[in-house]
Image (spheres, helix red, strand yellow):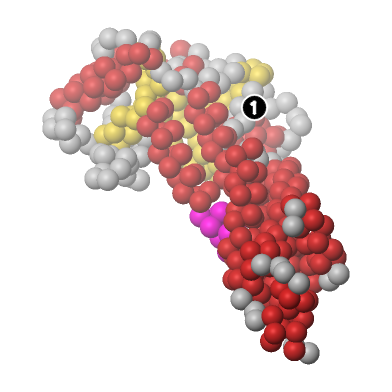
């Protein structure tokens, strides 16, 4: 029997039971579509993270309170405090550092003069923050030296924060209350997008934040911009040695962590990869269920076609012919389900991306993997029924009613 004859015979047999074949294919469609959509969400999240981090440049170092934990990197110890204003002078004396941008972060309920309110992050920053974070002013202005040093109660809003507090109105020169203290809005940042929360953030001068809110000199984070990305490791080591000396701690076990963009990207990619595999594994369960459905259908088909098998073997069909016949039917079912599932999975990922405003990515490798899995399922779950059909005794098969 040629391959063409085999395919024609397999398709004819499947079309003889359209409803059963359709329901069996549906199980594979659901499984493949689930895998495609789940992987696309995970890969989309990874792409968003990568683009956001790379947009900040590869020459950025982040210093946070807390030490490296055994077995991985700690992004600080929650409320642990070890960085202070006096550390900034130490950093400014290190060669090849372009900008130093300290940050104090808190979260407050904010009310605008037009009656709208939001609960969001408030960052105390200095003159370099918008430079190291690649932020652009859309309207108004950034803080000047007088405002930064004079404890001015002024604020610059992230794009989304401006929308939340003032809607479509121009917020410049209007007032907001941060924790019941009045601040004048002097600027709005352009929309940045990505996974960061800076669009949702309200910014005020660092010294103002420390004077009116935290009432101490501790810092949440220090961003450091290096003049040359090729000097990142050298500058990182110098920072560790200089701050460890200032804090009177062992450089090999400091009370702070210096993180490069590569470190952050690597750690977050590990998280997103695990997340993607977890989602795919959950979706993969439906594929196994679909495979069991195929096996159940094929076993039923073997029973119903026992006399046909007996006749074919009586006129010369070999065990190999019978195995190929039923195995090809199983593979056709799964490949058909795979094609429909890939299309449906892609459509689902597009819809999810639009509705949830997130990136979803369907890669060629994911499509190839899905087809491979569907074919593999057809072979695995179709082999036993095929083998059972081929092992039937032709005499017993012809007697079957």
Residue 246 location in percent, x, y? 17, 25
Give the secondary structure at mark 1: loop
Mark 1, other Cα within 10 Å: few <14 / some 14–19 / many ≥20: some
Figure disc tally: 1
Stretch in magenta = 278-286
Nearest the viewer among 16 and 6 is 6
- Kindly identify the residue that appears in the image at 33 percent across and 18 percent down: 232
Residue 381 location in percent, x, y? 61, 66
Residue 156 location in percent, x, y? 57, 25
- Picture quarter with the N terminus: bottom right
Dominant secondary structure of the residues highlighted in magenta in the image = helix
Q: In which quarter of the view is residue 124 placed? A: top left
Which residue is disc 1 drawn over?
191
Q: In which quarter of the view is residue 260 placed? A: top left
Q: Is residue 397 above or below residue 194?
A: below
- Picture quarter with the C terminus: bottom right
Residue 10 location in percent, x, y? 78, 62
Residue 226 visible to an observer of this rendering: yes
Q: Is residue 90 magenta?
A: no
Q: In which quarter of the view is residue 51 placed? A: top right
Nearest the viewer among 280 and 302 is 302
Residue 154 visible to an observer of this rendering: no
Q: Is residue 291 above or below residue 244?
A: below
Q: Is residue 213 above or below residue 385?
A: above
- Kindly identify the residue that appears in the image at 75 percent across and 53 percent down: 2
Nearest the viewer among 141 and 46 is 46
Q: Is residue 39 above or below residue 225?
A: below
Q: Is residue 281 magenta?
A: yes
- Kindly identify the residue that appears in the image at 37 percent across and 24 percent down: 61
């Amino acid at each position: 029997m040629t391959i063409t004859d085999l395919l024609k015979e397999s398709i004819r047999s499947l079309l003889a039971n359209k409803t059963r074949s359709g329901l069996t294919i549906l199980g594979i469609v659901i499984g493949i579509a689930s895998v495609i959509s789940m992987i696309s969400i995970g890969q989309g999240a990874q792409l968003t993270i990568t683009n956001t981090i790379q947009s900040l440049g590869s020459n950025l170092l982040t210093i946070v309170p807390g030490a490296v934990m055994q077995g991985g990197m700690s992004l600080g110890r929650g409320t642990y405090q070890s960085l202070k204003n006096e550390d900034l002078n130490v950093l400014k004396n290190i060669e090849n550092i372009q900008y130093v941008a300290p940050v104090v972060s808190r979260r407050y309920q904010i009310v605008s003069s037009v009656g709208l309110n939001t609960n969001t992050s408030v960052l105390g920053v200095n003159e370099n923050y918008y430079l190291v974070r690649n932020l652009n002013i859309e309207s108004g202005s950034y803080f000047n030296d007088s405002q930064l040093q004079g404890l001015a109660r002024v604020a610059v809003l992230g794009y989304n924060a401006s929308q939340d507090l003032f809607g479509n109105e121009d917020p410049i020169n209007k007032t907001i209350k941060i924790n019941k203290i009045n601040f004048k809005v002097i600027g709005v940042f352009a929309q940045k997008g990505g996974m960061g929360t800076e669009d949702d953030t309200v910014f005020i001068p660092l010294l103002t934040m420390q004077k009116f809110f935290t009432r101490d000199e501790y810092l949440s984070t220090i961003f450091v911009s290096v003049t040359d990305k090729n000097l990142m490791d050298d500058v990182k080591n110098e920072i560790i040695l200089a701050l460890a000396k200032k804090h009177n701690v062992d450089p090999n076990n400091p009370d702070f962590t210096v993180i490069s963009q590569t470190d952050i990207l690597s750690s977050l990619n590990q998280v997103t990869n695990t997340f993607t595999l977890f989602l795919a594994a959950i979706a993969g369960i439906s594929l196994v269920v679909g495979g069991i459905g195929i096996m159940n259908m094929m076993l039923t088909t073997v029973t119903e076609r026992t006399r046909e098998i007996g006749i074919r073997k009586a006129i010369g069909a070999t065990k190999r012919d019978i195995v190929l016949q039923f195995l090809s039917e199983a593979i056709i079912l799964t490949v058909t389900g795979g094609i429909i599932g890939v299309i449906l999975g892609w459509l689902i990922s597009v819809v999810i991306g639009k509705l949830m405003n997130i990136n979803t990515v369907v890669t060629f490798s994911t499509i190839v993997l899905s087809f491979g899995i569907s074919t593999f399922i057809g072979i695995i779950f179709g082999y036993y029924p095929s083998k059972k059909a081929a092992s039937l005794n032709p005499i017993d098969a012809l007697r079957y009613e």
